[in-house]
Image (spheres, helix red, strand yellow):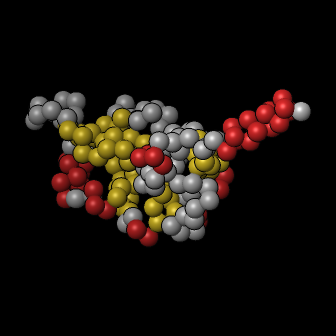
């Protein structure tokens, strides 16, 4: 009887000492600007240190807005916990759509909707070297890749439409992509 009582008491103490909490994690990864859906999220039980616990969203907490009004603020990899800064209200993120003329060979050949790229601008092939290439946008999402067209000078180019936060879209960026040779580097 004493052994049985000690076993039951030990099991209850061990269960009471389990301080794991359910947090939201990302199922298949998230792309900036995409609408958040319930299918993107899964509940996981984790034990976090006190200082880190407030940085993530628990499953028993309400979101800041209905899911259909939230978008992913930045790229989140599959299995990562959903941080408080990962979800933003669609209305709080004014967006712009920037068309880029990209010469053949200056972007991955299999570039597709949802890919995240860095946008570099520099002198093109055959241009006088006006200086090094400069990254003008970092981590922007591809909305659409257009068909091929003949660009000035007779080379093939395609128009790639990227999603950009309004606060990152300034005159310098628009001027650079309009006059320089644009190269897209996919971020994986």
The residue drawn where x is 10% and y is 35% is: 130
Looking at the picture, how far across and down is residue 174, in whole percent?
A: 24, 55
The residue drawn where x is 62% and y is 49% is: 22
Looking at the picture, how far across and down is residue 3, in whole percent?
A: 84, 29
Q: Quadrant of the C terminus?
A: top left
The residue drawn where x is 74% and y is 42% is: 12
Viewer-side residue, 49 vs 56: 49
Looking at the picture, how far across and down is residue 165, in whole percent?
A: 34, 58
Viewer-side residue, 31 vs 127: 31
Is residue 104 visible to the viewer in this orientation of the structure?
no
Q: Quadrant of the N terminus?
A: top right
**Which quarter of the picture shows residue 135?**
top left
Relative to 105, residue 144 above or below: below
Relative to 66, residue 82 above or below: above
Image check: 18 left or right of 105?
right
Relative to 25, residue 93 above or below: below
Image check: 121 left or right of 157?
left
Is residue 52 visible to the viewer in this orientation of the structure?
yes
Viewer-side residue, 163 vs 34: 34
Furthest residue in direction front, as rendered:
2
Relative to 122, residue 26 above or below: below
Total numbered labels: 0
The residue drawn where x is 43% and y is 42% is: 116
């Amino acid at each position: 009887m004493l052994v049985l009582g000690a076993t039951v008491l030990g099991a209850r103490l061990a269960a009471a000492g389990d301080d794991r909490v359910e947090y939201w994690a990302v199922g298949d990864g998230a792309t900036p600007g995409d609408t958040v859906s319930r299918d993107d999220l899964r509940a996981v039980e984790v034990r976090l240190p006190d200082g880190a616990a407030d940085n993530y969203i628990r499953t028993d907490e309400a979101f800041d807005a209905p899911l259909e009004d939230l978008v992913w603020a930045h790229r989140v990899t599959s299995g990562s916990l959903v941080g408080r800064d990962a979800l933003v209200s669609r209305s709080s993120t004014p967006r712009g759509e920037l068309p880029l003329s990209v010469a053949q060979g200056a972007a991955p050949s299999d570039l597709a909707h949802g890919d995240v790229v860095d946008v570099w601008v520099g002198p093109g092939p055959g241009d006088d070297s006006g200086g090094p290439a400069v990254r003008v946008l970092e981590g922007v999402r591809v909305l659409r890749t257009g068909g091929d067209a003949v660009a000035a000078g007779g080379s093939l180019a395609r128009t790639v439409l990227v999603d950009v936060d309004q606060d990152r879209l300034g005159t310098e960026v628009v001027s650079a992509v309009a006059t320089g040779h644009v190269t897209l580097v996919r971020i994986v």
